[in-house]
Amino acid sequence: MLVIAAPGQGAQTPGFLSDWLTIDSFADRLSWLSAVVGLDLAHYGTAADAETIRDTAIAQPLLVASALAVAHELFPDADYGCGSADIVAGHSVGEIGAAALTGAINPEAAMVFVRERGQAMAAASAVQPTGMSAVIAGKPDEVLAAIEAAGLTPANFNGSGQIVAAGTLEQLQTLADNAPARARVIPLSVAGAFHTVHMAPASQRLELLARSIGTARPVARLLSNRDGAVVESGAEYLDRMVAQVTHPVRWDLCMDTMASLGVTGLLELAPAGTLTGIAKRNLKGVELFNLNTPDQLDDAREFCARHSEAK
């Protein structure tokens, strides 16, 4: 049982697409996706510094384009980017890439959606300084109590040992100053309090946009961040992506679904490492693969063939 996973915002690093752009087909696809969103994604994936690609309006399209282009190099002959995957899931903005890879929406619609999402979330974040911090370790009930006491929202539930809090920078500092017992509070490289009420204006913008996006039934099991459910309707998944902007990411429940379906292998698309790191702690016995450079493609295809239920 094979899972293909697309990472969320914060996974991007300077130059992470440099090696991929030596492949003509990858460069051509990225050029097309860049034209769709009106951004030079090749520049942002190679030459831009960390602070530049931290910008929500840049990071989100860059990550979705990366997922789409890398997946098509992994499965160049497949009708859809998810190839032989049995399950496809994305973390936060990664859901948009997951939707396109399964055919729930088309790639161009995905890029327009993520461009508008990134711009709207950046605008919402500019209203007042906000951010997110990961709380590592500690007892879950004590962690949630400390987050609530600081006036923050638990925005990401990433499985055992990690809950992400979101809110104003002052609230985040309060949490850091009053960290739960045996827990560490680590600021994340994101420029806003995502998946909270702070993002309500972005959700309203996306709701209007979604009315014009065509949808189809996903060709693989597509998991939702809302509750880990397998969503069989593209229209429902699109509605969920709109609402998800202001709701917590329940990646813990996505992993519960993976486990219940009998996952044996999880491959994370570039920039990989975040989701496999979480899976290492939560999906014991599942083989993991970080696909970060094109010289890994043959090994990645062998990994997928070995774990795919459809082999």
Image: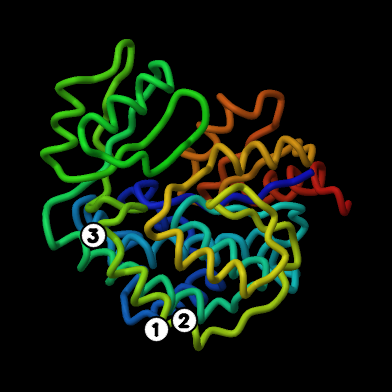
SS for tag 1?
A: helix
> Of marks 1 and 3, which one's residue comes earlier in the chain?
1
From this viewpoint, is residue 169 visible?
A: yes
Closer to the camera, 112 or 19?
Answer: 112
CB atoms of marks 1 and 3 within 8 Å: no
SS for tag 2?
A: helix
The label on residue 55 is 3
**Residue appearing at x 33%, y 60% in the figure:** 59
From this viewpoint, is residue 21 visible?
A: no
How many C-alpha atoms fall within 10 Å of the one at disc 3: few (<14), some, or many (≥20)?
Answer: some
The residue that label 2 is drawn on is: 32
State the residue lying farthest toward the bottom: 212
The label on residue 302 is none
**Is 231 displayed left or right of 274 in the figure?**
right
Where's residue 150, x and y in %? 20, 32
How many C-alpha atoms fall within 10 Å of the one at disc 2: few (<14), some, or many (≥20)?
Answer: some
Q: Is residue 46 above or below residue 91?
A: below
Amino acid type for the residue under numbered disc 2: Trp
CB atoms of marks 1 and 2 within 8 Å: yes
The residue that label 1 is drawn on is: 35
SS for tag 3?
A: loop
Amino acid type for the residue under numbered disc 3: Asp
Amino acid type for the residue under numbered disc 1: Ala
**Is 126 displayed left or right of 105 in the figure?**
left
> Of marks 3 and 2, which one's residue comes earlier in the chain?
2
State the residue lying farthest toward the right: 311
Q: Quadrant of the N terminus?
A: top right
**Is 205 displayed left or right of 214 in the figure?**
left
Q: Is residue 93 above or below residue 256?
A: below
Q: Is residue 126 above or below residue 37?
A: above
Discs 1/3, front: 3
